[in-house]
Image (tube, helix red, strand yellow):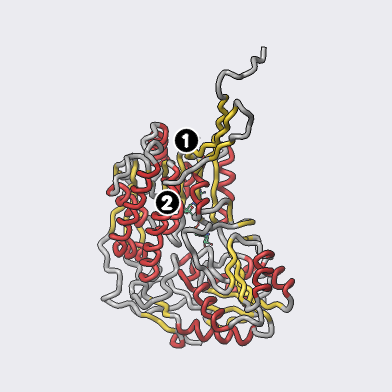
Amino acid sequence: MTEHDLTLVAGSAETSCGPDVVELQHLIDGNWTDSASGETFERHSPASGQLISRASRGDASDTEKAIAAARKAFDDRRWSDVPGAERARFLNRVADLIDTNRTRIARLETQESGKPISQAEAEIEGAANIWRYAATLAWNIRGESQNALGPDMLGMVLKVPVGVVSIITPWNFPFLIVSQKLPFALAAGCTAVIKPSELTSATTVLLGQLLIEAGLPAGVVNIVLGYGDPVGTVMTTHADVDMVSFTGSTGVGKSIVAATSATLKKVSLELGGKNPQVIFADADLDEAADAIVFGVYFNAGECCNSGSRIIVHEDVADALNEKIVALSRKVPFGDPMNPETRVGAIISKTHQDRIDGYVRQAVDAGARVLLGGEALSIDGLSGNFYQPTVVADVGAQMPIATEEVFGPVLSVLTFRTFDEAIALANTASYGLSAGVWSDNVHTCLEFVRRAEAGTVWTNTWMDGYPELPFGGVKESGLGRELGSGGIEEFLELKTVQMRIGKTRQKWV
Ligand code: NDP
């Protein structure tokens, strides 16, 4: 194959980034501040190499100041005493401001992450809706009462905010992921310290500006820019933090569980996935092929929900592979700032090498590359791009089939019986999502029952709604975001037992 067989979108003067460098500071106790050390770090576009942002580089002392501000804001009840209806109004104001600033946020998201501008815009629009959904929950925090404990006793279960939450986010959906956490934490009455990935700090800073514009009291949300060590380490070990909400790799998720154990913090984790889609012989192969291509190339495959592993009945494997390869050639890869582009740049050269390593390793172990399998050159852009890649004859135990590749790389495995398909689907240590393609509702429902996953899609892939919970089982995480339970993660139960009247029997 040559790159000319693909649909490539070259960089051009009109669509290239051409940015003014954005200067980013920490938000601590309502003030935008430089690091105590004065140090900074820079982010260059992974597509064009241009300098995009320069950010204050937080250290332990900056992080401790942010935690102290969040602690004080929680303890003096400046936010948790605000009635739910008013918190809801605030969240809706933020949503409106996100909408008003969508183009600006999306542009920065694309410049820092390399994702296509059309997807960044859709992501920001989706994020605004999550803020609106969380607003409905802020207005509806209800405990329960127990009125059958006997004539002289009334029981109540109150829901109270957990306290100070550390929110640590990755680079793949920077604005969306912080929006899956922060509005629910604020709806519950918590205060927060946020650390975005150092690769994608800018849009979290923009969000901070919008929170201030919407009228959030100082100290309720604080943002510290910088690296996992030391910023993340302090945020997960400090005694004044009550909870850590983290999205990222399973490896770091495990180290966060260990780090928080000394102070027994509540932990919520959204981690990796190696998400199988099983295609039965009676499936609509055209529909399936289209969804598979979307599932593996969306966000360049840098997606915890990436549909990177398909398990297809051997009778239809060749036919499906042919359709997938033909569609893959049509997907526009290239300049993320061009509205036509569907797949943009890979986040870093290091990550691109890692993706390529999985493909090389699979080929050495006997797998067959049907399409792609190499880095991609895009005219006019010097950044990191990887070809749409389809790898067949993949063995169930190969790392490409069991580990998160996080790139535009599809692994194809085959099966003969239902039990074999389920066994293959459940092989991975992950359990984030799974999918089934069949025209038979019984086959779909049997798969739904037996798949080890937090979400199962039937005859579709990667739809998502704020109303529906999201999270994983096994090594894909702990807890759930979104849905009506999304706020529960940030609430504790407090039991109240009230003796009614002077009926208490004396003990002595
Ligand atoms: P990480 O899990 O390493 O990082 C996610 C966030 O955690 C970042 O803000 C990071 O900071 C921070 N962090 C890192 N180490 C610590 C620590 N010890 N304590 C507290 N916070 C910490 O993901 P990466 O961004 O490095 O991506 C690596 C791989 O992780 C990807 O290739 C992919 O496989 C997977 N991944 C999965 C995601 C998912 O949604 N499931 C999302 C992103 C990545 P810093 O940026 O400074 O490292």
The kind of residue tagged 1 is Asp
Q: Position of residue 90 (x, y in %)?
A: 34, 48
Q: Residue at x 59, y 65 (%)?
A: 456
The kind of residue tagged 2 is Thr
Q: Quadrant of residue 331?
A: bottom left
Q: Quadrant of residue 400?
A: bottom right
Side of 421 relative to 8 (left or right):
right
Q: Position of residue 293 (x, y in %)?
A: 51, 77
Q: Give the structural element (helix, strand or loop) at label 2.
A: helix
Q: Residue at x 72, y 68 (%)?
A: 423
Mark 2 vs mark 1, foreground winner is: 2
Q: Residue at x 49, y 73 (%)?
A: 297
Q: Is residue 353 visible?
A: no
As measured in the structure, the alpha-carbon distance from the residue carrying label 2 to the one carrying label 1 is 29 Å
Q: Is residue 228 above or below residue 502?
A: below
Badge 1 crowding class, 10 Å Cα cut-off, few under 14, some 14 to 19, many 20 or more, is some
Q: Residue tagged by mark 2?
A: 136
Q: Residue at x 42, y 75 (%)?
A: 342
Q: Position of residue 34 (x, y in %)?
A: 31, 45
**Mark 2 residue's CB less than 8 Å from ligand 1:** no
Residue 7's label in the rendered image is none
Q: Residue tagged by mark 1?
A: 240
Quarter of the image with the C terminus is: top right
Badge 2 crowding class, 10 Å Cα cut-off, few under 14, some 14 to 19, many 20 or more, is some
